[in-house]
Image (cartoon, coloured by chain):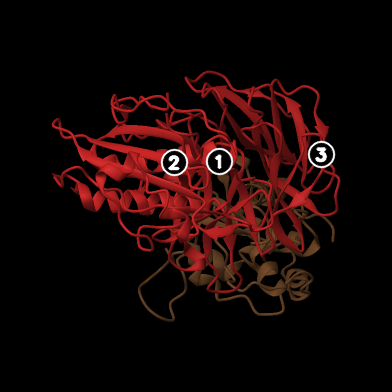
Chain colours: A red, B brown
Amino acid sequence: MGIFSLSGTLIAAALLTAIQPAAAQLSVDVTDESGNDLIIAIPAMPTPQSAPTAAGTTDALGRQVAEVVASDLRGSGLFRPIGPAQVRGITFPEVTAPQFDYWPGTGAQALVQGFVRANGDGNLTVGCYLYDVALRSELTRQGFVVQPSDWRRAAHKCADAIYARLSGESPFFDSRIAYIAETGPKGNRTKRLAIMDSDGANHRFITNGQAIALTPRFSPDYKQIVYLSYLNNRPRVFVYDIGTGKQRLVYEAQGATLAPRFSPDGRTILFSMATGGNTDIYSIPVTGGSPRRLTTAPGIDIGGSFSPDGSQIVFESDRSGGQQLYIMNADGSNQRRISFGGGRYATPEWSPRGDLIAFTKMAGNFRVGVMTPGGGDERLLTNSWQDEAPTWSPNGRVIQFFRTSQGRGGTSSVWQVDLTGVNERKIPTPVDGSDPAWGPILP
Amino acid sequence: MARLGSKIILAASLIALGACAKKAPEQLPPPPATEQPDTGDQSGVGTAPVPGSQADFLAKVSSDKIFFGLDQYDIDAEDQATLSSQAQWLQQFPNVRATIEGHADERGTREYNLALGERRANAAKNYLVSLGIPASRISVISYGKERPEALGSDEASWARNRRAVTVTVQ
């Protein structure tokens, strides 16, 4: 049963029935670089009866939901959506009874139909159906009950269901990004903590820019953000609580604390601490207490990213002379170098799937790449003057990073690339952006 | 250059050393007074800065900044001369505290550069301490690559941004 039940926002829709297992003729391959994208028609979603809601009328929302589904699927690089502006509208009864004689003529191989209905209690029900046009069969259906203000989440969940059904991968659209919003001249940039949906929508500034904010990370439950703030002109790691708007210092240190990360279970924070010019990595319970020192090498040990099971940490260190990547057990034992290519390696991030580590490679240009945890199969995915600081999509198939342009007017922006390196695009942000940090799939 | 442990510094040698610009960028640095708020005497043009003020510091020391090579944080002879002039001034005004700001150029990753700036600021601090300035009078802060002084994306600009700046705390 493809019905999601969410805390308060999305509730199981009772009207939808079980998925029919269908012959999987249609599929997309996330490793395919050929550009043979699957053509998928997504007409505007009709409503049984147009009704006003807090987010607009249900028929206006039906078109918007279809547009967001099309935009998500296009952004994945695997689909060529024919969106609501390019195909004819459908009637409400057609949603569950597609006109299979019509759709092949549009070129569509797959068809997404759905509806938006206002419920009596002020919520919306959004239905989402995926059909195989050639086989004239239903592949999946899901329904979501949302508050009108959350209509985009229903669209992302619909796109996720289609992506997952056709690619065999885990979903990732219904997720959020924390990042640093940048404004002002290069020599004195204002850097504010901000959050947005994975497609750049629902943007919100968190800090006001009076103190420099850098390097945010969401807690796995999205309730907190750990980041570096120059509050009171002291660079230190704080945990910001999104619900209360309050923040607290993670550890009262004499020197700077920086480069914070949550553990996958959200119970531990990794951070780096500079003492007399020497920087080492520490871990501390989120609830507070004494930090545990994990590295002792002279020089700069910094960053760090847990393996998905929390047992290991990949980090960067210049103990060998230049920046390179190392792995250690979560208690600091068994430290070993994994990067050996030419140039410097930095900002390692372990994929949520566990199979790859993303990094910044500095050898001439700064490029984002991936390698296995054993250090093998290095592949560079981007090539620009300065790309850095990768962050993984929840399904480990897409990477966001930030790109800086050269010169006095140089700016930073958030970009996204898939693991083929072929599908690269800029994520829209209201102002310049850096340090994107992707959170997990929303429940 | 010999280490200057004494309070007495030969001004002539400082000037000579200050003139030999090893890593110093080809462009001239901007007027230092634009970098920090001038907390000195504001009473009028032509008056000498109030002794012990930031303006006085800038007027008396050979430079408020030292520069570093790519990925380096060593204090070489030129840096020693600059820091020695700062130490001399700080010893003259024992009630004035100082903050050393460490910076990096833009051609590094953000977090590493924060640590690198910290390392550079500490190198400068340690040298001042070796000249007899109490460690308790000197704090450090790293801005990594977040506060470049030269805005170009070229070697000369990067050389100017790899710096440690001493700012008096008034």
**Mark 3 is on which residue type?**
Gly
* Residue at image point 50% right, 55% down: A74
**Mark 2 is on which residue type?**
Leu
Q: Quadrant of the C terminus of chain B?
A: bottom left
The chain containing the residue under callout 2 comes to A
Front residue of this view, candidates A184 and A130: A130
Task: Decide if residue A219 is in sight here.
Answer: yes
The CA span between labels 2 and 1 is 10 Å
Tags 2 and 1 touching, CB below 8 Å: yes
Work out whether disc 2 and disc 3 sit on a shared chain. Answer: yes
Choose the circle earlier in sequence order: 3 or 1: 1
Question: What residue did someone put label 2 on?
Answer: A130
Front residue of this view, candidates A102 and B162: A102
* Residue at image point 56% right, 74% down: A408
Numbered label attached to residue A375: 3
**Mark 1 is on which residue type?**
Leu
Expressed as whole percent of the image width and height from the top left, the position of residue A427 reads 48, 57
Name the outermost residue toward the front.
A101
Whether residue A330 is situated above or below residue B98 in the rendered picture? above
The chain containing the residue under callout 3 comes to A
Badge 2: how crowded within 10 Å, few (<14), some, or many (20+)? many
Choose the circle earlier in sequence order: 2 or 3: 2
Question: What residue did someone put label 1 on?
Answer: A166
Left or right: residue B85 compared with residue A55: right
